[in-house]
Amino acid sequence: MSERRLLLRGGSLFTSDDDLGVFTSGDVLVVDGVIREVGPEIIDPRAEIVPVHGSIVMPGLVDTHRHLWQTALRHVAADWTMSDYVAGMIQGIGPGFAPEDVRIAGLVGSLEALDAGTTTVMDWSHIVHTPAHADAAISALETAGIRAVYGYGLAALPAADWFESDLRRLAGTARFGRPDGLLTLALASWGPEFADVPTTVRDIELARELGLRISLHIGVGMMGAARAVTELDARGLLGDDLEFIHATTATDAELVRIAQTGGSVSVSPRVEMQMGHGYPATGRMLDAGLRPSLSVDIVSGIPGTLFGEMRAAMEAERARQNAAALSRHEWPGPLRVTAEDMVRMATIDGALALGLADVTGSLTPGKQADITVLRADVTSVPTADTIASQIVAADAHVVEHVLVAGEFRKRDGRIVGHDLAARRQDLDASRLRLLQAAGALV
């Protein structure tokens, strides 16, 4: 079988690789889905040439926490606080989800992510009412062709009697676990703030027995008073397989302990500021020695692009720093976070948080060819700014090409291989049924 060779030629390269850095003009050679070479003026007469002159070539974005099952309910939570969300979504609409609702939401949500340059997503799927719900969510990810960590999460507690056996079933299937495969399995635990410490301990022990990463929400608004990290630390449970979502009200000392034990963190700045989780902890995480990643969280409340999260995280942290300086009657000093920091959080730091840094997150030879290309646009050119600042200023409309493992998922500005009009009809039908069932149709 002949090799498939692609040569992205002539773009500005932001590699998210410390050794490679940035190229004002460079090429990326992809062979059979893997990045083979990165540099200026690569010559390969056997490769299909993809001209990207004047465009930015970067690693595909990595979203470390998104509830794809809520895709049909876009903007229903636009004016909700955290308590509104628990009552309206988790307790109100969520119980009405059938497996087909989960499937169509996961598929369209994945396509939405790909359209906006996100090639890897952690699907935090706390909508598993039955094993069929989990199978539907996984099927959606496979159909979309996105790289994904499937976070298996129960829709309600206490855990059903089939929970453990079903997680074991999925952990043993061939669809997960391949080092270069598109799907990875993880456990999305409710955690000690939404559940309790004994339940969380059992979750962590089970996941570790199965060799799965664990993701959990902590430091969420008033619930952060439970001091979840301190409780887990006292039991010797912190480790490099734990991903902590939000951590807005975690103490500085708790953030340091996460860093010391190799854990990772995910920031969802727009949701955190909107819904009352607390002020985004991006700068405090950096001060603690962590490398925060970024996530959209819920498209039922906010738009679904990581470009928006980059801007929100950067602006929120700069506002915090500047307000502190002004409160001391001082002019603000050097910026704590830069545009380049934001792009790294949305790429290589996201891959690190999900345990996928050897696979994706940078334009490094040997990694999977998960690549996003941003075209030159009236909003970004002409410019004398850095490539990183152009990326942070971008949005879905300038995403020209998206490749996952070397396969085009979006090409020339259009999603490949999916009838979006038909999927939109499916999604609308699901939305209407869910809202009617919940008595929330307006």
Image (cartoon, rainbow, N blue to C red):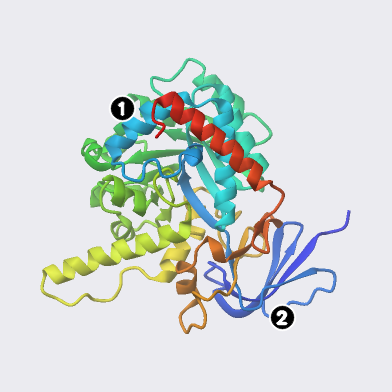
> Which amino acid, mark 1?
Asp
> Which amino acid, mark 2?
Glu
Q: Callout 1: helix, strand or loop?
A: loop
Q: Count the numbered circles shown.
A: 2
Q: Residue at x 67, y 80 (%)?
A: 40
Towards the viewer: 84 or 238: 84
Compared with 439, 417 (above or below) is: below
Q: Is residue 133 visible?
A: yes
Residue matched to label 1: 196
Towards the viewer: 288 or 60: 60
In the image, taking residue 325 as reference, residue 127 lies left or right, namely right
Q: Residues within 10 Å of mark 1 (few under 14, many from 20)?
A: few
In the image, taking residue 9 as reference, residue 207 lies left or right, namely left
Q: Residue at x 36, y 60 (%)?
A: 312
- How far apart are labels 1 and 2 at the CA level? 57 Å
Which residue lies most toward the right here? 1
